[in-house]
Amino acid sequence: MVLTEKIFVAKGASKLIGATRLNRLKPGIFSMIGQLKEQVQASGIDVIDLSVGSPDMPPPVHVKKALIKAIEDDNNYGYTLTEGIPELKKAIAFWYKDNYGVTLDQDKEILSLMGSQDGLAHIYWALVNPQDVVLVPDPGYPIYYAGALLAGGDLYQMPLLEENNFLPVLSAIPKEICKKARLMFLNYPSNPLAATATKEFFREVISFAKQHEIIICHDFAYSELSYDGYKNVSFMETAGAKDVGVEFHSISKTFNLAGCRLGFIVGNRDVINALRLIKSNIDYGIFRPTQLAAVAALSGPAECVRQNALAYQNRRDALVNELASYNWYIQKPKASMFAWAKLPSSFSSSEDFARDLLMKTGVAVVPGTAFGDCGEGYVRIGLVQELAKIKEAGRRMGEFVASIG
Ligand SMILES: Cc1ncc(COP(=O)(O)O)c(C=O)c1O
């Protein structure tokens, strides 16, 4: 009781005020879209939700079987090691070598996470001092901003523009910012941009990081979602990557296990050690059946991963073609589970567009500005519904655009 009063200061009868650091955060866009969706649904319009980044397809059967078997074993209900069980670390090392040709020391260069989000949020507590600058992509996945701000860091938003293939121009980052910068976040294939990186770009990043003593964090959550024979590039594959940084992974999108909450970080052992110290103070490891399901996923047949990507590729084609039939031409993404759609010139505000589209047609997408100022003029469309619904959403969006433009 005393503790509660110290932490929260009551204002009026019922309002509680939290710590001042909360002032650095913005309310999440998804709760706002959620409220609007409810209103639209209540008015009788059938909503097609392409706003969330949560996979709609089931996990592979062999992974579910491993999970069920592990759940039935009474020995699997205790705390586990923060590290990740040895079987999991071994499976991660095997998977990395097999997929990307990268050799990892399973004790020093791998740490399991409660979803990659856990690591993305806590890495700042391990590495960033108040007033250190964190270089973040704009547009970028929101935790990069929120995590840095909660740890007291200051943001420098690197504009990701179409004319630069949505890659940051490192030479444009001012010298005084480079001096104060501690960490850079990158994410390819990118959420929300669906953009991809090249080996040349990662080479440039590594020499920039060495020159300015900046740690690189690469979020590779969409590593296995790529189309038309294209294969995503791992930051870790680039010579020198382990000297300067780490890569984050997730089983959420690769194996449709988002609710299971398991990810991992690999790479530079000092960075991993720092995060390990934080995590050993704040959690007791991931539910053992979840870890065993991840072992089955990572060491099982790769065909299910290919089929999963193919399903997204078919959805992408359906969306792009449907919009094109209404003269709305958007870039065909090579990877990720999103399309980053440039609005027709008759629309100037992505928030107005997303709101009006939802209210009039029931299709929910995310305004580009939810991911940073450079997202203005775009919306993120998630390929997270079955093919027929994607086509229907494309038709409604096309008709909406045609009715205004
Ligand atoms: C770019 C990116 N990174 C990380 C995550 C978090 O994934 P998880 O915590 O489920 O591993 C997401 C989730 O949508 C994402 O889009």
Image: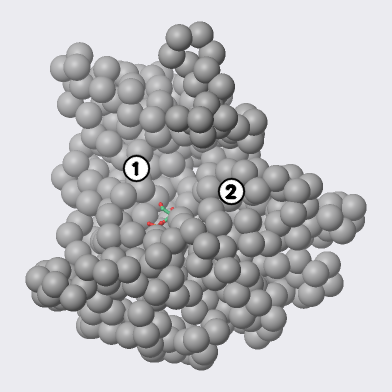
What residue is at 20 percent from the left and 14 percent from the top? 43
Q: Nearer the viewer, residue 12 or 39?
A: 12
Position of residue 44 in the picture relative to residue 404 (left or right)? left
As displayed, is residue 405 above or below residue 14? below
Q: Look at the image and tell me whether residue 162 can be seen.
A: no
Residue at the disc numbered 2: 147
**Splitting the image into four quadrants, where does ligand 1 fall?**
bottom left
Q: Where is residue 385 drawn, in percent x and y?
A: 23, 46
Q: Position of residue 206 (x, y in %)?
A: 72, 74
Which of marks 1 and 2 precedes in the sequence? 1
- Identify the image's colour scheme: rainbow, by chain, secondary structure or one colour: one colour
Q: Place residue 329 in its image quadrant.
A: top left
Considering the image in quadrants, where does the C terminus appear? top left
For badge 2, the amino acid type reads: Gly
Name the spot of residue 286 as percent of width and height, x first.
34, 66
Which numbered mark, 2 or 1, is in the foreground of this view? 2
Residue 335 x, y percent position in the rendering: 42, 62
Please give left or right for residue 16 compared with residue 382 in the image.
Answer: right
Query: Which residue does the numbered mark 1 point to in the structure image?
Result: 52
Amino acid carrying label 1: it is: Val
Compare residues 121 and 303 and report the one nearer the observer: 121
User: Between residues 264 and 278, which one lies in front from this camera angle?
Assistant: 278
| Label tally | 2
Question: Is residue 257 in sight in this rendering?
Answer: yes
